[in-house]
Image (tube, grey):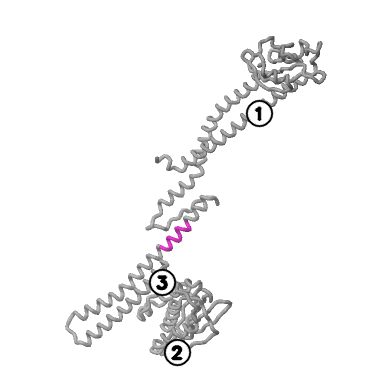
Amino acid sequence: MSLFRSIRIRLTLWYIVVLAVVLAAFSAGIYLTLRQNLSSNLDGQIDNRTEILLGVVSFEEGVPALETNVSPPGTDVDDQLIRLYDANGLVTFDSTAGAAQSLDADVLSRVLAGERVKHTVRMDDDRLRVRIVSVVADGAVAGALEVGLPEDEVTETLRILLVILAVAYPATLALASVGGAFLAGRALSPIDSVTRLAQKISAEDLGQRLRADLPDDEVGRLARTFDEMIDRLDGAFRRQRQFTADASHELRTPLTAIKGQIEVSLNRERDANAYRDALNGVNSEIDRLISLVGSLLTLARADAGEIPLATEAVDIGDLVVAAVEQMTPLAERKGLTVHIERGPAATAIADHDLILQLLLNLLDNAIKYTESGGEVTVSWGVDDGVVQVRVRDSGIGIAPEHIGRVFDRFYRVDTARSRREGGAGLGLSISRWIATAHRGDLSIESAPGRGTTVELRIPRRG
């Protein structure tokens, strides 16, 4: 039912059910405790009265007897039972003048045999609680004494208590229901406020925040957690939109160039050399597209966690030498020199192919941004269980305002120059992901006209 979908209703109902159980247990406890206390008090009065009467029993020729007035001052004689029996079971004294229910012969015989008996008898419309004890004279049972007091006070007190509980129980539950609903509403009102604010937030507009002015309790922490989550989602959506826009732009540029070259070639008849030049241009742009799409796929798989690390013991020195050998032809075509500064033996538990890709990306960037006649230096070392690899160039450097963003996807310090040389601004992003996947980091130091140094740090044990 829709009624029970409300947390406020469910909380109130649970509160009422729990309170009903607690009140029932509490009421039962009060009733049973009072009944026990009243019963014990009545039994004590009867026992005291019995002991007193035993002390005033007299014997006439071996037959027990009591004076007519044996009740204490202030005692209502009509509300008590005092009977005395001789050894043959005959009544020698009866304060009720026969109004009380006669004693069962079997009970009397048990008392005359020395047993102490408790039971109840009827007298008119009253119930009396009775003690029957033996009367002893000269070491022998000479008779029996029966003493009883009415249970009316106990019964009436318990009846009044039951009436009070019968009225108070539902009244308390009714008041508690109102109070529970009020308290549940007060407790849940901040959640209603948060819900209304959250309904205004959508995927198209993540700029709003709950910013509920709530104390540091469960609801307040929930609202702040929502705001933090929305901040993360907003950042992720912004990055996704920016990534999509940048990727579209990067893909459109080579596609436009390809279409332009094809249209120019088809515009009029040309010789074979002209077509060959056009096809070479198209091929160059296609290579650029393949590289860009490959980088995008790598980043997409990395974001989705779909690139497992095939870790093994990797000699960092060998990886550096292999990366330098692959990039040397490119450096020589540009008139650069690549040096290796060898360090100590350094082995790390890492993914061979990914670390090699990272080094190739760093060397590629260093060569791109170093003018002819410059040099690139690669070195490695070990510091406190961490392997360090540095790629240092003597290139144009990076201005301080750009250093914090060079690892962003599609970010270029010099857009025109980077695009002309085929860069998409993804190499450092992929490199940083590889370093992070190996529980390492990638840092950069640079200044305009003073070159750039990129340092990779990964733990030796992965």
Query: In the image, is 349 to the left or to the right of 414?
Result: right
Percent x, y of residue 359 = 45, 80
SS for callout 2: strand
Q: Which of marks 1 and 3 is nearer the N terminus?
A: 1
SS for callout 1: helix
Name the residue carrying label 1: 36
Amino acid on which disc 3 is placed: Arg
Q: Which label belongs to residue 337? A: 2
Q: Residue at the spot x=45%, y=72% of the render?
A: 309
- Quarter of the figure with residue 146: top right
Amino acid on which disc 2 is placed: Thr
Whether the residues at callouts 3 and 2 have beta carbons within 8 Å, the answer is: no
State the separation of the CA atoms marked 1 and 3.
Answer: 83 Å
Amino acid on which disc 1 is placed: Gln
Q: How crowded is mark 2: few (under 14 residues within 10 Å), some or many (20 or more)?
A: some
Span colored in magenta = 227-236
Q: Which label belongs to residue 409? A: 3
Q: In which quarter of the image is the N terminus?
A: top left
Q: Can residue 1 be seen in this view?
A: yes
Spot the residue most to the left.
Answer: 269
